[in-house]
Amino acid sequence: MTAIVVRDLVKRFGDVAAVDHIDFSVEAGSTTALLGGNGAGKTTTISILLGLLMPTSGSVEILGADMLRDRYRVLAEMNFSSPYVDLPRRLTVFENLNVYGRLYGVADLRRRIGELVSDLDLAAFADRPIGSLSAGQRTRVAMAKALLNRPRLLLLDEPTASLDPDTGDVVRSYLEDYRRQTGVTILLASHNMAEVERLCDSVLMMRQGRIVDRGAPQHLLDRYGRDTMEEVFLDIARDRGAGVGALKSASAS
């Protein structure tokens, strides 16, 4: 089953094509990375998938629903997390999770909040207002909010930004286990290439609003002749093209 199907998607802001005729699909139960430098079009693409932006043209199908005509049928089965989108700062962690849980109609909400508070280690600051938390603490609360409704599709923008290495590893392990247990589909935007190599089955590389390469992480490493996804990312971001790394590796040997 395919969870996301995007066809000939375009989003223009005046004369600027933020998303420029892209096509891709994401298989159900997989984790796919949407990568690119600042201004590549990732956030615009995710906003369209969430139904927050209307595209200039093209089509988006999520969980079998046309997002331009019937998005309300599947919005309750999706969720989103970003450390750059603030939750209400005057509300405590518990209050925020309670409000969002009610909006999603989560059954047995108190129990679900308790599970997430335990799993993501939020108990020490669960009674504090969001505005008083560190960036890393807010990132973990945002992840808890995104998992409240047990979504079938999870859209993550920099899910471990601001987290220390230990907590970041805990969150990545939690996401791996959660996907195995639930079969959730994850679309992940990240600048952490080690995270991409660890979590993702496939990668979509964007530059200037277009998808310029795609494939499994190991496939891209082989094609570019690189040892890490960070090196592949730099090759693509700087438009050096596939094979550059392979040629350098061959020359060195």
Image (cartoon, grey):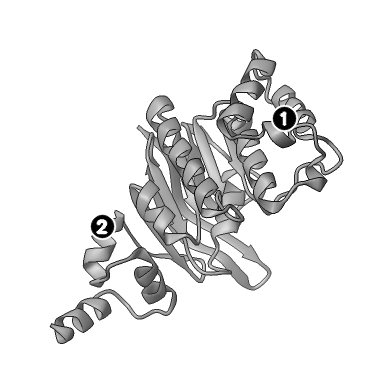
Picture layout, residue 45 above or below residue 238: above
**Numbered disc 1: secondary structure:** helix
Seen at 69% across and 17% down, the residue is: 110
Kindly indicate whether the residue at mark 2 contacts the one at mark 1 (C-beta within 8 angstroms).
no
Q: Which mark is residue 218?
A: 2
Residue 51: x, y in percent?
63, 43
Q: Amino acid at mark 2?
A: Gln
Q: Which mark is residue 97?
A: 1
Q: Mark 1 or mark 2: which comes first in sequence?
A: 1
Report the front residue among 169 and 14. 169
Report the front residue among 46 and 37. 37
Report the front residue among 180 and 243. 180
Picture layout, residue 34 above or below residue 67: below
Query: For this view, does 79 lie left or right of residue 94?
Result: left
Q: Residue furthest left?
A: 253
Q: Residue furthest top?
A: 108
